[in-house]
Amino acid sequence: MTQDNSERTNPPETWKGHRACFECRRKKTRCKLRCTISERELTRRLVSLLESRLSDGQDIDMLLSQTKQLPKVNDIHTPNSLDREQDQPMRDDSNDESQSEIIVFGTSITAEDSTSPASTFRSTEADVPTWLGIPVPVLTDLVHIFFSKTQGWLPLLHKPRFFARFMKNGVFDDRKHSNTEALLLCGMFALAARHSSNPWFHSIPAPDRGQAFMEKANAYYEKCQSDQAPSLEYLQGCILLAAYEYASGPSHRAWILAGVCVRLAYDLNLCSMDEQDESSDWSILEEQRRAFWITWELDTFGSLMSRRPSSINRSMVMVKLPTLRIRTREHGSS
């Protein structure tokens, strides 16, 4: 009996030597390998990092002097570097490799998921232009998604005119935009983001991907309220905000934004625009008609959902119905 107790109190020899690797001890499983990161794998990563640093023009003597400070491979998982008291049970992750980390030259190198936003843009972060902190390739992708996914049920913009104004050689122009332009763009991106498969949104659920753009759009909406003169661009931005709010679910803010759209449409005299001479460009007139009828749809939808009277007087509407498809002429498809 005493012999059995002594055997139980004395831990196995493997506990003293920590022959199992850290990951297997953490997961409390039998270790089949000596350690998770083998000497060959560590050497390969160090060589790869040295080559990348040398390609950037760093001095080789400086790099070699820093390698002397690195811990030896055999010392990484010894009892001297990791006490048993630190081996507390931790959450078991499926991507064990993604949690492994090496400290080299004062820089943390983590084996992350190759599809995460950070790993996608870390190597080219200094080279990729951004607008409002979002990489331009992501914004370019969202523009195309808007016209392929959202424009079908919210035909608000004329694609050739939009591309001529906000795109440069097929890429989003990251120039400085006015408040109304930024409101329009952020509203577009908010509606299109949920359909994006870009790795930049990998860690964000699809229904929540437009929320950051919506917050930026609301900030520009507050700035635009101080402007006295209404414009079609401002109305289009408010329509996109109201459409996003209603797509997220009926709310008081969606009802208020729909009312703002109605007031702006009246201020722009869109309710009787076809009583005037059609001297403007045909695409501009068509955008005005579509802005009015989408405003009418938002007003009607909100009235039906809230069981309240609508704001647009239908007996005084003198606006042609929008065409089934905006005429493209020499501009291409819309």
Image (cartoon, rainbow, N blue to C red):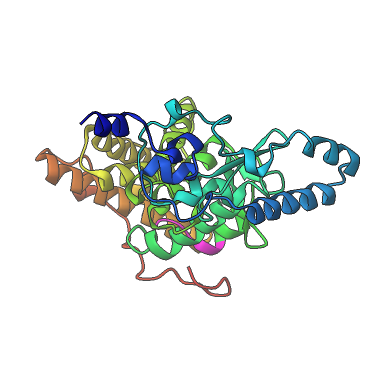
Q: Nearer the viewer, residue 308 or 266?
A: 308
Is residue 59 positioned above or below 223 on the image?
below
The reply to whether residue 277 is in sight is: no
Residue 67 on the magenta span? no
Of residues 39 and 181, the one nearer the viewer is 39
Q: Predominant secondary structure in magenta?
A: loop
Query: Seen from this angle, which residue lies furthest left?
Result: 307
Q: Residue 128: x and y, percent?
A: 67, 49
What range of the chain is rendered magenta? 155-160
Question: Does residue 175 appear left or right of residue 249 in this picture?
Answer: right
Q: Position of residue 298 (x, y in %)?
A: 26, 47
Give the percent coordinates (x, y) of residue 281. Answer: 53, 60
Residue at 50% x, 44% y is: 19
286 left or right of 297? right
Residue at horizontal 35%, vertical 51%?
A: 206
How many labels sit on residues?
Answer: 0
Q: Which of 163 and 68 is in front in this view?
A: 68
Residue 18 in view (yes/no): yes
Residue 268, x across and y down, in percent: 41, 42
Instruction: Tell me what residue is drawn at x 43 percent, y 65 percent.
Output: 148
In this rendering, the answer to whether 268 lies above or below 6 is below
* 53 to the left or right of 325: right
In the image, residue 158 lies in the stretch drawn in magenta: yes
Residue 14 location, quadrant: top left
Q: Quadrant of residue 306?
A: top left
- Determine whether 281 is above or below 241 in the image: below
Q: Quadrant of the N terminus?
A: top left
